Amino acid sequence: MNRARDVSAEEFLSGWPPRVRRLAEAARRCIRTAVPYATERVRPGWRLIGYNAPAYFAFVAPERDHVRIGFEWGVMLSDPSRLLEGSASQVRYVSIRTLKDLRGRAPR
C-alpha cells in the first residue's frame, strides 16, 4: 500500500488566509507548550493537524474565519467555565477567533 506523501503543517496551512494561519500557528504553539512530547501530524483527509501523546488526543482545525482546538475525548473533560463547544458524543472543541482568545481563558 502506498502512503500519501506526508504534508508539513506549514504546507497544509499555506492554503488558508493569513489571519487563519496566524491563529493556527498560535494554537499549535499552545498545544506544543502544554504537551511538549506530543507528536504532530497533518491529516489532510480530516483537514486538520492532529496530536498524539502517545494516542491521538487533540487537533487544530482551520475554518473559513477561525480555528478550532479540539479534544478527541473532550466529552470527558471537566469544563466548569463552559469553554468547550460541541454536542457530539465524544469530541469537544474551543473556537479561536482572535489571538486574545488563546490568552487567559483557561480555568484557574
Image (cartoon, grey):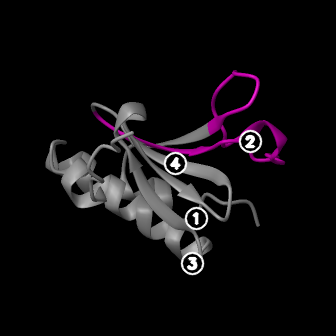
Mark 4 or 2, nearer chain start: 4
2 or 1: mark nearer the eye: 2
First of labels 3, 1 by sequence position: 3
Q: CA distance from mark 4 to mark 1?
A: 20 Å
Tell me, yes or no, whether the two marked residues, 3 and 2, touch with CB atoms within 8 Å. no
Amino acid at circle 3? Pro
The three-letter amino acid code for the residue at tag 1 is Gly
Prevalent SS, magenta region: loop
Q: Quadrant of residue 62?
A: top left
Between the C-alphas of marks 4 and 2, the distance is 11 Å
Neighbours of disc 3 within 10 Å: few (<14), some (14-19), many (20+): few
Q: Are marks 4 and 1 in contact (CB under 8 Å)?
A: no
The residue labelled by disc 1 is 104
Dot label at residue 73: 2
Element type where label 3 sits in the image: loop
| Tag 4: amino acid | Phe
Q: CA distance from mark 3 to mark 1?
A: 20 Å
Three-letter amino acid code at disc 2? Trp
Q: Nearer the viewer, mark 4 or mark 1?
A: 4
Element type at mark 2:
loop
Tell me the distance, in whole angstroms, between the alpha carbons under discs 2 and 1.
Answer: 23 Å
Q: Secondary structure at mark 1?
A: loop
Q: Could you tell which of marks 2 and 1 lies nearer the N-terminus?
A: 2
Q: Which residue is mark 4?
A: 59
Q: Say left or right for 56 vs 98.
A: right
Horizontally, residue 49 falls left or right of residue 72, namely left
Q: In the rendering, at what x and y percent does residue 58 appear? A: 59, 51
Q: Of marks 3 and 4, which one's residue comes earlier in the chain?
A: 3
Quick check: 74 above or below 5? above
